[in-house]
Image (cartoon, helix red, strand yellow):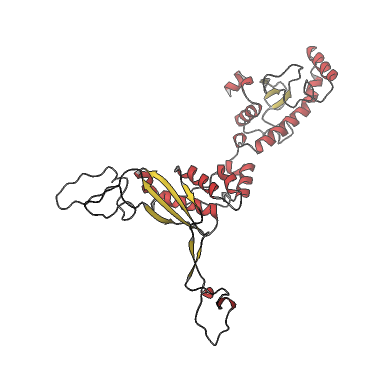
Amino acid sequence: MSLLRDDPHAFDLFQAISILERGDPARARVGTSVGMDEALRLAAQVDLAFAPSDVSGLHESKQPGPPLTLKSPVLTLAGAQGPLPMPFTELLMERRRARDMAGLEFLDVFNQRLLGFLYRSRRKHHLALSTESINQAPIVRSLDAMSSLGRAEGVRGPDGQQAWLRHAGLQGAAPRSMASLLAVVRERMGVHFSGKQFVGGWHALALCDRARLYDPGKPVPMTSRLGMGACLGARAWDQGAGLVLDAPPLKPAQYAALLPGAKNNSLLGWLVARHLQSDFQVRLRLDLAVQPETRLSAGGEQSPRPSTAAELPPRLGLSTWLCSAGASVTHYQPANFLLSTEEG
C-alpha cells in the first residue's frame, strides 16, 4: 500500500484497484455498488497527451464517499482516445485551468461505472484479483464444471489430494489421449513417464455370456450358437484395454515411493483413473538408476550395508531378486506390475 501511494505510476490499473480494495475490506468492492460505499473513487485523467501509465495519480478524496481517488486515462469519455468530440475535451481542459471541475466531475459519474464494470469483468476471470476463496471464484467453478475435476463435489485422492486447476485444459476433452495423460502424471509426480497404448488386456465375461452345455429345459440363446457369439472360457481378450507406463531410471527413494502400497503409487493410480474414466488395465514398469544389491548375512558375520537399504526395503520381485552367487547385478528384471486404478 505504501509503495502504491509513493509511486502509483509503477502499478497496473487492475493491480492498484485490487490492492486498494484489500486495504479497506469493510467497503463494497469496486463495480458492485453505487460508488459512494465502494473502496475507492475512480476518476478520468483527461488530456490530449499520450498516457505513460494506466494510473495517473492517487490522492485523498475531499468529497463524501470513498477516502481515496484513483485517476486513470483508461476508458475515459473525454480525451485523446475518448468518444466525445475534441472541442468538448478542449473545453473541459480550459475549465480545469480555471479551477472549474464541474464538467469533469459530472463525467466521472459515468467513468466510475465504466471502470468499475471493466475491473469487475477482469476480476471474474483472473484469480490474482479475487479477494474471496479460490474455490469460490467464478473462473474456478467454471473450469471445475467443464473439466470434471470434481473439486466442488469433494472428490479427493487417497490422501485428500485435489485435481490441479492447471490441468483443466488437459482433462476437458473427451476422449482423452495418451499425450494428455502423460502431461498430467509427469507434472504431478515429477517423473518423466513414457507410455505405450494398445498392449491389450483381459475382460471377465458375465455368467450369461459364457458358453455352456445345452440344457433341454432352457431355450438356446443366440449368443451361444457357434459363430453367433459363443466364447470359450471366462474371459475375453481386448487389444485396446491396456496400456503401459514406463518410468526412467529412478533414485531409490523415488523407486520405493512408486511400489505397490506406497503413497505415490496410490496417487498415480488415482490420477490415471480420474483421467481415463474407463476400465483400463495399466501396467507400471519401474527401473533403478543404481544397481540393486541386497545380501543376507548369517550368524555374527558382518556384511557391509548397501547405501540404498534404508530407502529401498527388500521386497522380492520388486526391489530384491534371487540369483546365484556368480550372477551379475547388472542383469535383473525390473519391477513390472499392474497399477491399481480403483477410485476411492
- Estimate the x, y position of residue 41 in percent, counting from the top left: 70, 26
Asked which quadrant contains residue 124, the reply is top right
Q: Is residue 18 above or below residue 333?
A: above
Residue 9 lies left or right of residue 90; in this view the side is left
Tally the marks.
Answer: 0
Asked whether 243 or 272 is in front, the reply is 243
Asked whether 223 or 154 is in front, the reply is 223
Q: Residue at x 61, y 43 (%)?
A: 140
Q: Residue at x 49, y 42 (%)?
A: 187
Can the viewer see residue 158?
no
Q: Is residue 173 above or below residue 80?
A: below
- Estimate the x, y position of residue 328 in percent, counting from the top left: 26, 48
Q: Which residue reaches farthest front? A: 227
- Estimate the x, y position of residue 250 in percent, counting from the top left: 38, 44
Q: Which residue reaches farthest left? A: 300
Residue 188 lies left or right of residue 11; in this view the side is left
Residue 93 lies left or right of residue 155; in this view the side is right
Can the viewer see residue 210?
yes
Image quarter (top left, top right, bottom left or bottom right) of the N terminus: top right
- Estimate the x, y position of residue 54 in percent, counting from the top left: 67, 23
Asked which quadrant contains residue 230, the reply is bottom right
Q: Is residue 37 above or below residue 209?
A: above
